[in-house]
Amino acid sequence: MPMDFTGIIRAFIASNKSNILRDITTLINIEGHYTEKAYVEEVRDWVRHAFEQEGFKCHTEEVAENRCGLLSAV
């Protein structure tokens, strides 16, 4: 039988709601459009930093000169 983590997830969200909303607000207020590589890189770097602060190991793979590289985290 699979474990149900719904309660744990809901509790985490409830206890971190203000931080989650702050982070979402920060992300949506970053200037730019998805076709503008520099702005997409700014968002990617912000997300990378947040993941690394949580202990994830991150890697960016460049895929094209005119596009933001792909971010992976484990």
Image (spheres, grey):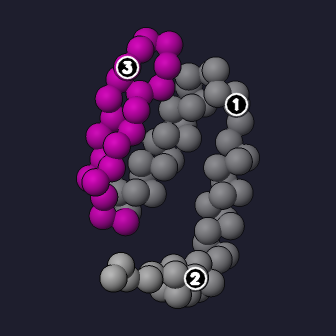
Q: Residues within 10 Å of mark 3 (few under 14, many from 20)?
A: few
Residue shown at 55%/41% (left/top)?
Answer: 43
Q: What residue is shown with label 3?
A: 63
Q: Taking the image as drawn, is residue 16 in sight?
A: no
Residue shown at 71%/36% (left/top)?
Answer: 31
Tell me the number on the disc at residue 10.
2
The answer to whether marks 1 and 2 mark residues whose Cβ atoms lie closer than 8 Å is no
Query: Considering depth in this image, is 74 or 45 the residue closer to the camera?
Result: 74
Query: Considering depth in this image, is 26 or 62 the residue closer to the camera?
Result: 62
Q: Secondary structure at mark 3?
A: loop
- Please state if 25 lies on the left or on the right of 72 as rendered: right
Q: Position of residue 14 (x, y in %)?
A: 62, 84
**Residue type pointed to by label 1:** Gly
Which is in the foreground here, disc 1 or disc 3? 3
Q: If you read the primary sequence from the N terminus, does the residue marked by circle 3 or circle 2 appear first? A: 2
Residue shown at 50%/47% (left/top)?
Answer: 46
Membership of 18 in magenta stretch: no
Q: CA distance from mark 3 to mark 2?
A: 36 Å
Snapshot quadrant of residue 40: top right
Residue shown at 61%/72% (left/top)?
Answer: 19
Q: Residues within 10 Å of mark 1 (few under 14, many from 20)?
A: some
Q: What residue is shown with label 1?
A: 32
**Residue type pointed to by label 3:** Val
Q: Residues within 10 Å of mark 2 (few under 14, many from 20)?
A: few
- The residue range painted magenta reads 54-74
Q: Secondary structure at mark 2?
A: helix
Q: Taking the image as drawn, is residue 68 in sight?
A: yes
Q: Relative to 33, is 21 above or below?
A: below
Q: Relative to 12, is 24 above or below?
A: above
Which is in the foreground here, disc 3 or disc 2? 2
